[in-house]
Amino acid sequence: MKLCQQQSNCPQPRLIFNNWLWATILIGVSTLSIGFFVLSCQDGPVKDPNVDLINQAITAAGARWIADETWVSRLDEQERQAMFGTNENMDLEQDNVLEAVPVPPPALLNQADLPERFDWQNYQGQNYMSGVRNQAGCGSCVVFAIIGAMESSIRVSNQDPDAPINFAEQHIVSCVEGSCNSGWSFTQVLNYLVSDGIPSEDCFNYQATELPCSQTCSGWRDQVVKLDAYYQVGNGLNEIKQEIMRTPLTTSFLVYEDFMYYDGGVYENVFGDLLAGHAVVIVGWDENPADAPGKGCFICRNSWGPNWGEQGYFRIAYFDCGLGLQNNFSCIYEGDLTPPPPPTGLKASNYYSQGIAGASLRRIDLSWNEKPANEVYGFHVYRATVNDPSHLGRITESGYPVKTNHFEYYPPLGDTDQIMYFAVTSILASGRESAFSEIVPNMDPA
């Protein structure tokens, strides 16, 4: 019996030993896992191996630029493809170019007559370029390149680097033949800008997709800005430089995989497969960059937002990847962006009535003199609760200015005695806005 009892007691110590063994193993594995997790957290996410490969290729080629992960390099293949918008063959678009060119390209200067460096981002201490945009997941680079060149051309021609110009790329995406998958034609977009023009951004905000043209704000044809003309520029270096000195111009080039990783410097293709064609704006050049001596380059604005490259721009060695060889178009705009005069004679009068259940209602009628100039397209109305222009806020809808010299404002229900202050501005079809009119309070009619 004792033997049997001893034998029956034998499994107990083995069970205790097994539990202790497994606990030790689990603790050890857990410790290793925690250590690995902490190490992984310290190291951060795994880096894209292409970064080191590209930087090695840059060094081997004697190039002078830096590769790193960017928000574009992190996109998957399908998302990346949507960041382009021209054909890989980049055929020169000649068939549909307008014949009439009122201002022919000037005679070429010699290289010695051109400056070593020129950049519309810093011309006589002023930046004439409009803000960097992001085409997002739509192959609309041609649209953004042309509109970017047009906006800047208008600033240059009017010698006004601060002109508040922001055109509606979405209108072109929606109203000109093309698609987010296949892109748009340079000449079709340019011809449309000459014949139909383009409204401001607040008339049709960009949404990176193909929406019906009818979604453009009502009355948009009355507020468009049109190009006077455009022309093609040759692909000689001096010819391109001289044209840049007149205005920024569009161009196209071939994009290779390493361009996705561009993080600064003078880009040269050193790594990766051909992905697609792409359109950008050339804004300047530099014969001898400080960070890449002897690497003459174009300075270009991209349409991948300000968080890519050099604040949305990049520098590229002359004609690398074909940039500057094809689709060099220059915009001509000869309109006047001088602001219109502000309206005069503004009055704000209270009118009272009884609403449902006897509630007192107030309407403030605003009126002012007729249009101060024939070019005035409409008016915007502003309101504040104090007599201070810095507090004025617009109460007319963006993209829909008042077309007459009268506006009715309805304060919140029950507000029958608060004093408010009003001002009105004049608007040109181009979107240029006047200074405020005289600021007046609302008053009971005499």
Image: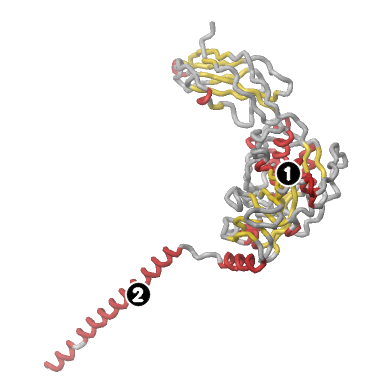
Can you give x and y, in whole percent of width and height, for residue 150 in the image? 73, 40
Instruction: For residue 438, say whether it is visible.
Output: yes
Q: Residues within 10 Å of mark 2 (few under 14, many from 20)?
A: few
Can you give x and y, in whole percent of width and height, for residue 415 in the image? 45, 19
Circle 1 is placed at which residue position?
A: 248
Rendered-image quadrant of the C terminus: top right
**Residue farthest to the left, as pictured:** 2
Q: Is residue 270 above or below residue 438?
A: below
Q: Is residue 386 above or below residue 43?
A: above
Residue in the picture at 65% in, 23% down: 426
Can you give x and y, in whole percent of width and height, for residue 254 in the image? 73, 58
Residue 14: numbered disc: none
Q: In the picture provided, is 231 more to the left or to the right than 52?
A: right
Mark 1 belongs to which amino acid?
Answer: Pro
Circle 2 is placed at which residue position?
A: 29
Q: Quadrant of residue 83?
A: bottom right
Nearest to the eye among marks 2 and 1: give it: 1
Q: Residues within 10 Å of mark 1 (few under 14, many from 20)?
A: many
Q: Is residue 348 above or below residue 237?
A: above
The local secondary structure at tag 1 comes to: loop
Mark 2 belongs to which amino acid?
Answer: Val
Residue in the picture at 36% in, 68% down: 34
**Residue farthest to the front, as pictured:** 112
Q: Nearer the viewer, residue 323 or 76?
A: 323
Residue in the picture at 62% in, 49% down: 312
